[in-house]
Image (cartoon, rainbow, N blue to C red):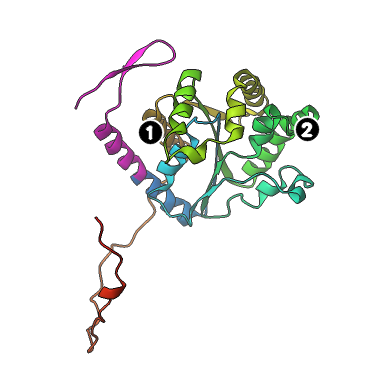
């Protein structure tokens, strides 16, 4: 397996994680996520995972790797659009409450109620008074979540300036990624230090013993995905539930059935 050097933001050089090693470890971790899923369903547990970070920090990539081998009926991803006029008139956290997990569910927020302390604040969509009120009340809401039996995990994905620039530039001419680049992304890109100040204040105000923030270096996407999945598995005391051995039953007899000719309905075989 070949490795090439890459320089991290702290000046240290580390071996690049090879694809074969990455895929092997990802497969192992995804197998553990399936075990976690079975445990959550068997025990009726409730898990809520929050992912926050700057644009291009890699939230979507981590979430995709977490969910691609598990059931969407157990692992639900919530990525809410901009609030409607009606939702704007509600108590701020109200539109998130209906998405909280019930027994036997894992809910993943791709951005969450922390929009108020991040993008809404930096882009001027909310007042400073509302932000300060949110920072004061968010821990109380999360205390209620934890007291109700929800396992709450909060992750901040940290990406450096140079890496963020490289990722945004890669979206400009890539037809697979162009949908990820919005006018809002470009505006937020120019406000790096405003986001830094907002992040610092948010983490300081809402990092609690019962719902701490976990910060992940996401400059190396592959390592970040493995590190985050490994970490979240360590935060939940799951075990493999009892499972009955799987035995395929005998198929029924044909009973005179004949397959009809569907050849005229087949799509063209271009590949």
Instruction: Give the class, few, some or many, for how many residues have Cα within 10 Å of label 2's Cα (few <14, many ≥20).
Output: some
Q: Which element type, helix, strand or loop, lies under badge 2?
A: helix
- Residue at left offset 37%, top offset 11%: 12
Quick one: which residue is furthest to the left in this view?
1
Cα–Cα gap, marks 1 and 2: 36 Å
Question: Which quarter of the rendering shows the C terminus?
Answer: bottom left
Whether residue 181 sits left or right of residue 64 in the image: it is right
In the picture, the disc for residue 31 is none
Residue nearer the viewer, 211 or 72: 72
Vertical arrangement, residue 31 with respect to residue 243, above or below: above
Q: Earlier in the sequence, mark 1 or mark 2?
A: 2
Q: Is residue 29 magenta?
A: yes
Vertical arrangement, residue 51 with respect to residue 84, above or below: above
| Image location (x, y in percent) of residue 257 | 24, 86
Query: Viewer-nearest of labels 1 and 2?
Result: 2
- Residue at left offset 40%, top offset 30%: 221
In the picture, the disc for residue 130 is 2
Vertical arrangement, residue 162 with respect to residue 122, above or below: above
Q: Which residues are magenta?
A: 1-30
Whether residue 186 sits left or right of residue 135 in the image: it is left
- Residue at left offset 60%, top offset 22%: 190
Question: Which quarter of the rendering shows the N terminus?
Answer: top left
Give the labeled residue for mark 1. Answer: 226
| Image location (x, y in percent) of residue 248 | 25, 69
Q: Which element type, helix, strand or loop, lies under badge 1?
A: helix
- Residue at left offset 70%, top offset 40%: 141
| Image location (x, y in percent) of residue 237 | 45, 41
| Image location (x, y in percent) of residue 240 | 37, 50
Q: Is residue 245 magenta?
A: no
Residue nearer the viewer, 43 or 4: 4
């Amino acid at each position: 397996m070949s490795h090439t050097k890459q320089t991290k933001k702290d000046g240290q050089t580390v071996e690049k994680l090879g694809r074969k090693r990455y895929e092997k470890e990802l497969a192992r971790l995804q197998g553990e996520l399936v075990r976690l899923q079975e445990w959550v369903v068997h025990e009726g547990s409730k898990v809520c995972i929050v992912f926050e970070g700057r644009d291009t920090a890699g939230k979507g990539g981590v979430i995709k790797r977490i969910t691609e081998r598990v059931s969407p009926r157990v692992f639900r991803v919530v990525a809410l659009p901009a609030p409607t006029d009606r939702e704007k008139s509600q108590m701020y956290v109200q539109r998130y409450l209906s998405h909280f997990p019930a027994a036997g569910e894992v809910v993943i927020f791709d951005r969450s109620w922390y929009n108020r302390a991040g993008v809404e604040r930096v882009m001027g969509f909310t007042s400073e008074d509302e932000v300060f009120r949110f920072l004061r009340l968010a821990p109380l809401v999360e205390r209620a979540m934890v007291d109700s039996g929800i396992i709450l995990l909060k992750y901040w994905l940290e990406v450096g300036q140079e890496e963020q620039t490289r990722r945004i530039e890669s979206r400009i001419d890539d037809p697979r990624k162009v949908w990820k680049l919005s006018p809002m992304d470009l505006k937020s890109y120019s406000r790096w230090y405003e986001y830094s100040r907002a992040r610092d204040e948010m983490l300081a105000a809402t990092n609690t013993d019962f719902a701490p923030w976990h910060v992940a270096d996401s400059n190396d996407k592959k390592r970040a995905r493995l590190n985050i999945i490994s970490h979240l598995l360590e935060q939940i005391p799951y075990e493999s539930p009892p499972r009955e051995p799987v035995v395929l039953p005998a198929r029924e007899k044909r009973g005179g059935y004949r397959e009809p000719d569907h050849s005229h309905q087949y799509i063209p075989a271009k590949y």
